[in-house]
Image (spheres, rainbow, N blue to C red):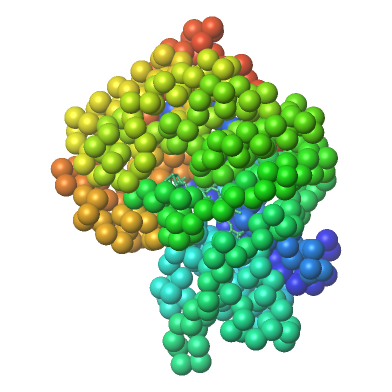
Amino acid sequence: MSSTEENDIIFIQPHLLSDLLKHEQNQIVVEFWDTMHKHAVLLGDIPSEPNHGIFFIAGTLLKAGYKVDALDFHAYDRYLRYSEGRKVEYSDIEESIRTKKAKVFAISSKTVAINRAIEIGRIIRRNHPSAVIIFGGLHPTLHGQELIKENPEIIDYIIQGEGEEATLELLQHLEGDRDINEVKNLLYMGENGEVIINEKRLICDIDIDNLPYPAYELICRESSPIVPRILSARGCPHSCAFCSITYYYDRKYKLRSPESVVAEIEYMIEKFDIDFYCLGDLTFLLNREYTHKICNLIIERGLSNVKWWCQTTIGRVNKEDLELMKKAGCIQVAFGVEADDQAIINAVDKPYSVTKTEEQCRLVKEMGMTVQNYWLIGLGGDTKESIERRIEQIKYYIENNLTDSIHISVPVPFPGTPIWSDPGRFGYKINHTDFSQYWMNCDELGYGKPVVDLENLTADHLYMYWFLALSAATESFKKVVANKDNTFSHFRPKGLFDSDSFEEIPAFF
Ligand code: B12
Ligand code: SF4
C-alpha cells in the first residue's frame, strides 16, 4: 500500500517487549530462556505471535469492502533489536504514523501495554487531528470507563469485548449509516462528560461459524511465515481467580461447528502454506465428543500432516483422545498446572485434581507428544514452604522428562479478574496500579517485581522465589540437555522465526 492512499481504518499493535534489551536483563532470566530453548522449541504463547484479534476484525471489515491496514510495532521492535541492537523509539513510531492516512486508527492493548497504547494515541492525535481514535482488546474492555475518563483527549471510542461486528457497526455509524445507539459493545463520553455504555453483544448472539477468517495477509503478505490461532470456541466456562477471561466473556462459552473449524484449518494451509497452527482455545478438550469430531474431520480431509498445538487443564485427556489427536497432527499439549497443592488450587477456583497432574503429563509423553506446563508462584495461601515444594516439583517434572517446556508466572491482579475486584478474599494486597509493571513474567517479553503482597510473603519475597524457581529449572534443563536420549527432537515450525530468518519478513512500513 502506498503511504498516500487513505485507509478506512488502520489497526495498531503497540510494542510489547520490555524496556530492557537482552543484555540489560537479569541474567537468571536470560539463562533460563536460553537453556530451555536448547531443550525444546516453544510452540504456543511465543513472543513472535501476532495480535490475532486485529486480524480477526480486519477479516470482517475487508469482507464488508473497507480499506484496512495494520501496523505492528511489536514486530518492528523485535526486528530492530535483532538487526540494529536497539529498541523501537516513539520517534520511529511517529515517523511511521505521520506518513499514514486513515479515517480511523484502532489501537489494541493488554493491561501492561496500555501506557504505550496511550502514547501512540497521542502521536496519532498530534499528526492526524481529525482522525477518529478507537481502543479495544483486553484492557479497554475490562477497564474502559476509567481509561476514557483519564484520556478523553485521546480516545474517541472504546469497543469492549468481541470486535468484529462492533467495529463494522461503528464504521457504519461514522459514515452516517447507523445510529450510535445501535453500535453494540461501544463505550464513549457523552456531551456532558458522562460515560455512555451501549448494549453488549453476548457471545451466544455471535454467529461464530460464519465470521470471515482472520486476514493474516495484512501483516504477513502471502509468502511470509505465520502460525495462525484457530479458535474452535470463544470464552471459557471456568472462572479462575487470576484470569482476565472470566469477566471478559461473562463466564460464557460457545463452540463453533467442527466443520467450520476444519474448513478454516484447510483455508490457512492452502493460503499460507503453513506447517503448524495453534488450536488456540483457552481450554481445548472441554467436550470430548467435539474434540473427536474435529480430529476425525482433520484426518478425513487429509490435513493431519500439518502439525498443531493446544492447551487445556489437567484431567481433560485420556489415551483414546491423545491417540486420535496425534493421528490428526497434534504434537504438543500445554497444561495449566499452576500449583501442586489441592487446597491452593481450590482457593483460586481452578477446577481440577492435582493427583492427576503427573499421570496426564506422562500419558502425553507416552503417546509421543511433548508437554508444556504453566506454573504459578505466589497463589493465595502460598507460604515459603509451599513455594519451595513447588520448585522441587518443577525440577522433578523436568528431570523426569514429564515436561518439555515451562512457563513460570506470578499472579497479577489485572482489572476484571476476581483477584482485582476482591483481593482480600484471595489473600492478596494490591500494592500499586502502575499498569506498566503488570507483568505475568511468563514469557520472554518482559518481567518485573510482582505487584501484590500475600498474607505471609511480600512482593519482594515472591520476586526472589520467582528467580529461585527459574534458576532451579535452568539447572534441571541443563541436566536433561546433557542427556541426549532425553532431549526433545526439535520440530521448528517455519512460522516461529527467529533472528536468523528476519530477512523473510517483508518491510513493515
Ligand atoms: C496469544 C496471546 C499472547 C501472544 C500474542 C499477543 C499479541 N501480539 O498481542 C503473546 C504470547 C505475545 C502474549 C503476550 C502477553 N500476554 Co497474552 N495472551 C494470548 C492469548 C492466549 C490469546 C489472545 C488471542 O489471540 N485471542 C483471540 C482473539 C480473537 O481475541 P482477542 O485478542 O481478545 O481479540 C478480540 C477482542 O479483544 C477485540 N479486540 C482486540 N484488539 C482490539 C483492538 C480494537 C481497536 C478493537 C476495536 C477490538 C479489539 O476484538 C478481537 C476479535 O473479537 C490470551 C488469552 C485470550 N484468550 O485472550 C492471552 C492474554 C491476552 N495475554 C495476557 C498477558 C498477561 C500477556 C503478557 C502480559 C504476559 C507477560 N509477558 O507478562 C504478554 C503481553 C506483553 C505486553 N507488553 O503487552 C493476558 C492479558 C491480561 C490483560 N488484562 O492484559 C491474557 C488474557 C491471558 C491471561 N493470562 O489472562 N499473549
Ligand atoms: S485460567 Fe484457563 S481455565 Fe481458568 S478461567 Fe482462565 S482460561 Fe479458563
Residue at x 72% of width, y 86% of height: 176
Q: Nearer the viewer, residue 396 or 95?
A: 396
Q: Nearer the viewer, residue 25 or 234?
A: 234
Image quadrant of residue 392?
top left
Image quadrant of residue 261?
top right
Image height check: is 232 above or below 250? above
Q: Residue reaching furthest left?
A: 456
Image height check: is 291 above or below 478? below
Image quadrant of residue 162?
bottom right
- Residue 356, percent from left and from top: 38, 26
- Residue 338, percent from left and from top: 37, 36
Which corner quadrant holds the N terminus? bottom right
- Residue 164, percent from left and from top: 66, 64
- Residue 371, percent from left and from top: 51, 25
- Going by the image, does 219 lie left or right of 235? right
Residue at x 63% of width, y 33% of height: 292
Residue at x 27% of width, y 59% of height: 422
Q: Is residue 267 visible?
A: yes
Q: Nearer the viewer, residue 501 or 161?
A: 161
Residue at x 66% of width, y 61% of height: 207
